[in-house]
Amino acid sequence: MTELDVREIPPNERHDRIHDAFDDLEPGESLTIVNDHDPKPLYYELSAEVPAFDDEAYAVEREGPERFVAELPKAASASEPETVRVDDIDGEPAAQAFPGSEPKTVRLSLPAGESVAEHDHPDRDVLFHALEGRFDVALDGEDHRVEAGELLRFDGERSVEPTAREDATALIVLAPRSEP
């Protein structure tokens, strides 16, 4: 385990130092950082930009008014092929099929009437594949019905809010948009 106390590092240098320390980790290792505030912006940055960051295993604990300790895990590298059932991928309501890998592939399971709050996926192309049930997927406020076996493709810049109209499961692929 590697630990980095960033409280004495100038704020404009912290993220670069954290990225460097994270890059030095071996797959399956974790970087512990000690910070003077909740490092949630760092979490979002790593989750969006660093494929090796295992955002599902991220953890943070507040140990005092100006002491936050966060675990930044690096995903273990894939080795042998593995067969899994979509329903067995851990995490509710969403779970990554390949933590730390690109493109991000997420299983979303929602009971009837439940939704995921409106959000977007900048710099991504999104493929929403309904596996079971039926969803209403609002894109910039406009509803699109997606039933089992159907795909909805859209630009991740659009705001999205999926709602299950019945118990439903989808597989979502968030692919980095290639430069033109």
Image (cartoon, helix red, strand yellow):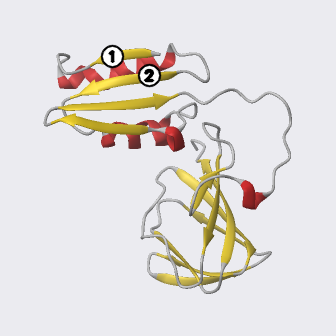
> Looking at the image, which residue is at 64% across and 85% down?
166
Q: Callout 1: few (<14), some (14-19), or many (20+) C-alpha neighbours within 10 Å?
A: some
Q: Give the CA distance from mark 2 to mark 1.
A: 7 Å
49 on left or right of 148: left
- Vertical order, 165 against 10 (above or below): below
Depth order, front residue of 85/47: 85
**Circles 2 and 1 in contact, beta carbons < 8 Å:** yes
User: Percent from the top left, x then y, of residue 1?
Assistant: 47, 16
Check disc 1 and report the residue beneath it: 4
In the displayed structure, does residue 105 sit left or right of residue 81? left
Label 1 sits on a secondary structure element that is: strand
User: What label sits on residue 31 in the rendered view?
Assistant: 2
Q: Which mark is residue 118?
A: none
Above/below status of 133 relative to 26: below
x and y percent of residue 44 in the render? 40, 43
Q: Position of residue 59 (x, y in %)?
A: 41, 38
Q: Residue flagged by tag 2: what amino acid is it?
A: Leu
Residue 158 point in image, percent of width and height: 47, 66
> Which quadrant would residue 72 be assigned to in this image?
top left
Q: Secondary structure at mark 2?
A: strand
- Kindly identify the residue that appears in the image at 60 percent across and 43 percent down: 178
